[in-house]
Image (cartoon, coloured by chain):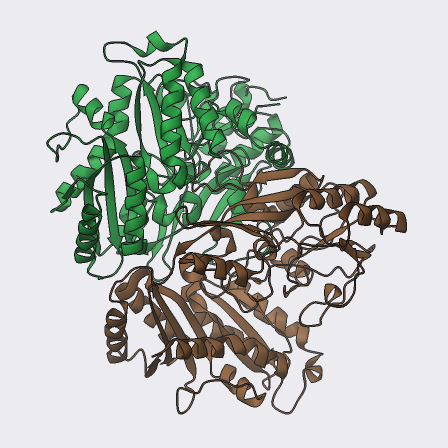
Chain colours: A brown, B green
């Protein structure tokens, strides 16, 4: 049974952590970005190094105090805010931001868990290398959180998720012991892969304190284009055709429904308008080559062929870096437009890539049966089968008008996902908001194994209580 | 406490599995390829489907009988042969070989665990796709074993190890329950990654019965070359230079010392001789492109530049597919030559890529201090920092002459590896031969976590007893 820390406990912790090491839990530390949850915390512990992290964990383990690990606070499923149970210690890694090493020969960076993603990207770029994890919150999210949640983003198609970009982690386990897993090896088959168990466990099995990350050649050639396609099925055919012509050069293949730009216009968010009228469906295509390979000429030929085959009805290829950035800004602004309109329900789902068109059809019908006035904004990483499938009120109405059917909408969408062999959380994780969904849709043998592993590695249940698995 | 199955147990198992489902444990089922271990088994169970696998596991769990999972039997660390303790049931997946699906749009293959790797490669090729796992034993090893051991091979540099090529697994857990993890999703963040926990656990946490595998565009352009380099450090400089010029086209970068071809000559194994005299060090370079990208011209330019920079003293570029195959046969024959000479001690190690030259120097000195007559044949996957570092008797002497110093050689090599932050088992795994090494070099927090996970997921210890972790 966990308990809230008393003042003696906090005083001892403060003494151990030194000046600035303990502060009141308030403001951003207790909020999640969409304001859906309000957390609680007895204090925020801000250790400066891994030994101090271990000291916090050891103290909490001894006293039976819960710990909520906190990275950049950008998670969208409430993994960073504990809403129930005794007040925990919030463990922030924000004073552990060092980028210890960028090695362009080994193609490795060693960074502390509190390093901000954009800083890691910049450090890699300075060494003429690419760290390819890229997501909307990259200016504030932290590597520890990216790994704990196995973050995805816009370049997964080519480079994989955070998990795939990590060679090793250093972590503090629930008893305060230190896992020295900060290896820089490309191959290491010496026992169970504790790294992969910690990655994606959302801070419930251990606290990642540092990571060895994979770097790649910096892109030497880039092509960015906005393409008008007929529908998701046409977008898939386009993807297949481009793959045959351009192979691994395809870094991003983002599908957007016209509802996305329409919401930007509706809510007054500035954005490019490269087409006269927005087509029903858009693809943002990003091509990169780590070597000089005449990518520009090859991609123009491939796009022309696609246009001749009727797969593209219109295309705008960025002529400058600024234009490319504007195209990406269009894509990255869509969540902001969504927030201003105010979603009835949001879904971060994945299905097998080939099933995306059928899923969009089926989910659209299922939602319309619940309420035909609901507007859908569907966009996402088509190449990964990952869609952000969000439901919005009709023009002139508010999300509150739909409170009664909100749960039904999510149930219909997730049931449809399940029918297609998909996932109800493609990249955001489980956190606290989706614990029930995991219980509902998760494989029973997997859930049993997860509970057994949690009990084995965190027998007192102090690490992020109530996240991923319901607290006992 | 485990016990050997009695005749009643075996009779019931035979009835459940049907004709051909149970056979005596003998011959190859009890051997490992280098003849270093002789196993034991009460019988070989050969289920035809996942339910039958579950029935075997459930029966063994109820009776406290150990299970040794058996794929192609090609493992090199004794994971497939149990030498001590009560006789187990050997669980062979050789009747579960179906390749259920090859989907070129989703780039996914669904295969049963008993499918032979070469058959999976061929099925992918038929659909104009590549399944990139490639290793010397591909004609007999099976996918289930490849995943259980996280197999590596010659294309890891570009495509990763078996782990990186797997989207999902179906597995029978230690209580006989079925984990339905055969997903075809590129992104799925719904709880702990049981797939990655099972992969590389060498059959000690569950029995993989089927897998969803990633496919890639089939190579449209290929370049294969044998390059003479001055030394490992020069080979690394060459790799870095080629990476800048050719980026992700580099699929294989295999380093070989001249001792390798010399052993082939010494033991009468046919091989190409593209150079007049063998240079001290050779690189086998494989370049592939999944799209038309003028790879031939680009790679010639890159090799010429490398020659001008003094990084290559001689080069032979394969002019035909046969010649390319011959170059690869040279590389793949080296283990056969080694076996004929008879190694004193073999080591499958990895270090950070940039540390390879210093490691080779340091290990050479350490072995020479033990016995200066020992010959080293060092070869491997330089791009992954993975070397097969093997010690052989002087000409005219036999391995038995070195029995007294054999253990010292391995200790010296592994201590050197450890000093460089490396791994004593880069791709072969732990099995039974390296349990002691894991205990010696493994991180204590990782070992504690492994033992806790094993106890949690296989509380009776029936799955591959004594592999990876010492049986309790």
Q: How far across and down, in percent of the image, does residue A260 sit?
A: 51, 81
Q: How far across and down, in percent of the image, does residue A289 sit?
A: 32, 62
Q: Along the line of sight, which residue is nearer the eye, A238 or B257? A: B257
For the C terminus of chain B, which image quadrant? Answer: top right
Q: How far across and down, in percent of the image, does residue A125 sit?
A: 44, 60
Does residue B359 appear in the picture of this structure?
Answer: yes
Establish if B75 lies above or below A204: above
For the N terminus of chain B, which image quadrant? Answer: top right
Establish if B200 lies above or below A267: above
Q: Along the line of sight, which residue is nearer the eye, A188 or B31? A: A188
Residue B194 horizontal side relative to residue A220, left or right:
right
- The extreme right residue here reads A7
Residue A405 horizontal side relative to residue B205, left or right:
right
Q: How far across and down, in percent of the image, does residue B460 sit?
A: 63, 29
Residue displayed at 32% across by 83% down: A313
Residue B432 horizontal side relative to residue A54, left or right:
left
Q: Quadrant of residue A185?
A: top left
Residue displayed at 24% across by 46% down: B286
Residue displayed at 51% across by 36% down: B201
Residue B439 horizontal side relative to residue A219, left or right:
right
Does residue B217 appear in the picture of this structure?
Answer: no
Q: Along the line of sight, which residue is nearer the eye, A310 or A254? A: A254
């Amino acid at each position: 049974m966990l308990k809230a820390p008393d003042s003696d406990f906090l005083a001892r912790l403060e003494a151990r952590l030194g000046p600035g090491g303990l502060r009141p839990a308030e403001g951003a530390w207790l909020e999640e970005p969409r304001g859906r949850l309000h957390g609680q915390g007895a204090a925020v512990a801000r250790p400066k190094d891994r030994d101090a992290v271990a000291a916090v964990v050891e103290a909490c383990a001894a006293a039976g105090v819960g710990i909520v690990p906190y990275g950049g606070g950008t998670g969208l499923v409430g993994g960073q805010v504990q809403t129930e149970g005794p007040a925990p210690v919030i463990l922030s890694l924000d004073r552990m931001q060092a980028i210890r090493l960028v090695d362009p020969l080994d193609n490795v960076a060693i960074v502390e868990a509190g390093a901000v993603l954009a800083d890691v990207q910049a450090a890699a770029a300075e060494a003429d290398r690419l760290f390819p994890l890229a997501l909307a919150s990259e200016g504030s999210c932290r590597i520890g959180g990216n790994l704990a949640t196995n973050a995805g983003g816009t370049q997964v198609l080519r480079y994989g998720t955070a998990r795939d970009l990590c060679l090793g982690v250093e972590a503090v386990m629930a008893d305060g012991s230190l896992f020295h897993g900060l290896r820089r090896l490309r191959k290491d088959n010496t026992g169970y892969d504790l790294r992969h168990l910690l990655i994606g466990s959302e801070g419930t099995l251990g606290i990642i304190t540092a990571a060895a990350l994979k770097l790649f050649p910096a892109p030497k050639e880039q092509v960015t284009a906005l393409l008008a396609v007929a529908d998701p099925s046409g977008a898939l055919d386009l993807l297949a055709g481009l793959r045959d012509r351009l192979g691994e050069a395809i870094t991003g293949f983002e599908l957007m429904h016209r509802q996305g730009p329409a919401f930007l216009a509706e809510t007054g968010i500035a954005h490019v308008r490269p087409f006269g009228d927005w087509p029903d469906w858009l693809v943002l295509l990003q091509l990169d080559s780590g070597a000089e390979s005449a990518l520009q000429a090859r991609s123009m030929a491939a796009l022309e062929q696609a246009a001749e085959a009727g797969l593209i009805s219109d295309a705008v290829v960025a002529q400058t870096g600024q234009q490319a950035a504007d195209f990406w800004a269009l894509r990255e602004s869509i969540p902001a437009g969504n927030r201003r309109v105010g979603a009835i329900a949001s879904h971060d789902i994945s299905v097998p890539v080939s099933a995306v068109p059928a899923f969009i059809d089926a989910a659209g019908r299922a939602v319309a049966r619940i309420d035909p006035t609901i507007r859908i904004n569907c966009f996402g990483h088509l190449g990964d089968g990952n869609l952000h499938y969000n439901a919005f009120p009709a023009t002139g109405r508010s999300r509150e008008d739909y409170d009664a059917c909100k749960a039904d909408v999510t149930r219909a969408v997730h049931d449809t996902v399940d029918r297609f062999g998909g996932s109800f959380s493609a990249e955001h994780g489980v956190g606290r908001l989706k614990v029930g969904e995991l219980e509902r849709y998760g494989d029973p043998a997997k859930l049993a194994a997860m509970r057994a592993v949690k009990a084995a590695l965190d027998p007192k249940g102090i690490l992020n209580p109530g996240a991923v698995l319901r607290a006992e």
